[in-house]
Amino acid sequence: MSVAPTCRLCAGPVHQWMDLGRQPASNSFPRPDETGAERFFRLAVGICADCTMVQQLEAMPTDHMFRADYPYRSSTSDGLSRHFEEVAGWLRRTELTGHTDLVVEIGCNDGVMLGALGAAGVRHLGVDPSAGAARDAALRGAEVRVSFFDEAAAIAIRAERGPARVVFSANTISHVADIATVFRGVDRLLTPDGVFVFEDRYVGDIVEYAYFDQIYDEHFYLFSVRAVDAMATRFGFELVDVERISIHGGSLRFTVARPGARPRRDSVTRMIDDEARYAIGEYETYRRFARQIDRVGTDLVALLTDLRAAGRRVVGYGATSKSATVTNYCGIGPDLVPFICDTTPEKQGRLSPGMHIPVRPHAAFVDPYPDYALLFAWNHAEEIMLKERRFTAQGGRWILYVPQVHVV
Ligand code: TMP
Ligand code: ZN
């Protein structure tokens, strides 16, 4: 029998529950002449028998995922932009009430939240390894240090600007396999009574709604409240609050503080109890989920194959990172989906990671409309379906594949 790999957080045994096969970096969109240089890894996920953290068994190297030309931009979704403006307002009302309070955002991308805080006169700094995203953030008036966030970066920031009252991060903390470096940095940077607030996808929602395409290279960890609680404690902090938010199909906003610095809200134990009821920390739950993923993959390929045989045109909508998992796991290439439309200029004219489906601007979707649109950006379904009501009005149909394959 082979020895189980060990947990990145507690060194407990990690039991694999799914292997999604050979996968590319989900945000590396090669130009047609660059396909030979793509890097792949084995996307396998397991759960730690001790701390219950769901995690990948092999990590895609960080410097390959988050490069200067990282193409993702939060601002391409109106819903996300609104959300980050609301977060800025909430932080101003609750935490950043002093004149000189500093907020540091890890992985600030194109700076929607920091731009809003900067406009309100709040001292801020973003930390992000993508120079391209940092340039876009600067256009919003956000100041960004182009680097990864680790202990050395935190020491440098503190020396330059003093301690931070708030360290914030959205959809980034779960990306860092060596999460201890992040916590060491936060420890260096945070005031004694400051808070570290981070938002990430919730594994409870991923399992409940079968959002299997949330599993991709960048989502090294899939967080539960129980596992994050244990993680915070391990790194010398305390999880004091947790809140459900609807972003990306279901996320959590965690608030972490130094032990005893803040009262611990009931939400934490309430959610840990709920997770126990739904067996979120148990291997069997994930094995069941894996069987469901298998079925969705088979059904999706069958549907696309039938539609092609019937002469129907299907195009992809939204060249999401999630779509890398779906297309590579199912083996969906340009023969089944001739192109994916996406509004992000950085992705257009390039190919989808691994399966090399061309990415085209939105204009290609409209002229002429396809018969079916495969909605890879299902997390923005409401916004997109409203925007595209002419597509459905003239007979177009949407294909969705979570929690199962269906056409609307
Ligand atoms: P996300 O699911 O990771 O937020 O990525 C969404 C992708 O979908 C991103 O590449 C932008 C694209 N997109 C569109 O092309 N049109 C839209 O209306 C929206 C909301 C997103
Ligand atoms: Zn563990």
Image: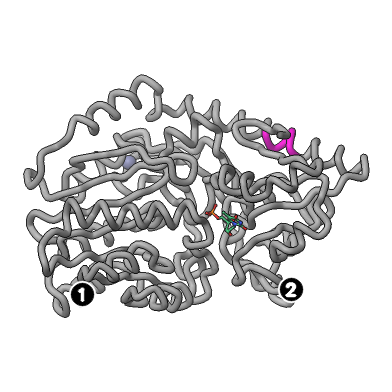
Local crowd size for mark 1, using a 10 Å CA cut-off: few (<14), some (14–19), many (≥20):
many
> Could you tell me which residue is drawn at 13 percent across and 59 percent down?
97
Q: Nearest the camera: 38 or 262?
A: 262
Q: Which residue is drawn at 50% across and 55% down?
A: 78
Residue for badge 1 = 157
Q: What stretch is highlighted in magenta?
A: 296-300
Q: Does the magenta stretch include residue 340?
A: no
Q: Which of 122 and 221 is in front in this view?
A: 122
Viewer-proximal residue, 26 or 7?
26
Between 24 and 139, the residue placed more toward the observer is 139
Q: Quadrant of the C terminus?
A: top right
Using the rendered image of the protein, determine whether residue 213 is visible from the camera's viewpoint: no
Q: Does the magenta stretch include residue 299?
A: yes
Q: Is mark 1 within 8 Å of ligand 1?
A: no
* In this view, 287 is above or below 400: above
Q: At 47% from the left edge and 68% from the top edge, which residue is drawn?
A: 66
| Dominant SS type (magenta) | helix
- Please say which color scheme the image uses: one colour
The reply, left or right, for residue 169 in relation to residue 202 is left
Of the two numbered discs 2 and 1 on the same chain, state the one appearing first in sequence.
2
Q: Are marks 2 and 1 in contact (CB under 8 Å)?
A: no
* Relative to 352, residue 203 above or below: above
Query: Which secondary structure, mark 2?
Result: helix
* Residue in the image at 17% along x and 34% along y: 265
**Residue 352 rendering spot, x and y as whole percentages:** 68, 61
Q: Mark 2 points at which residue?
A: 32
Q: Which amino acid does label 2 sit on?
A: Pro
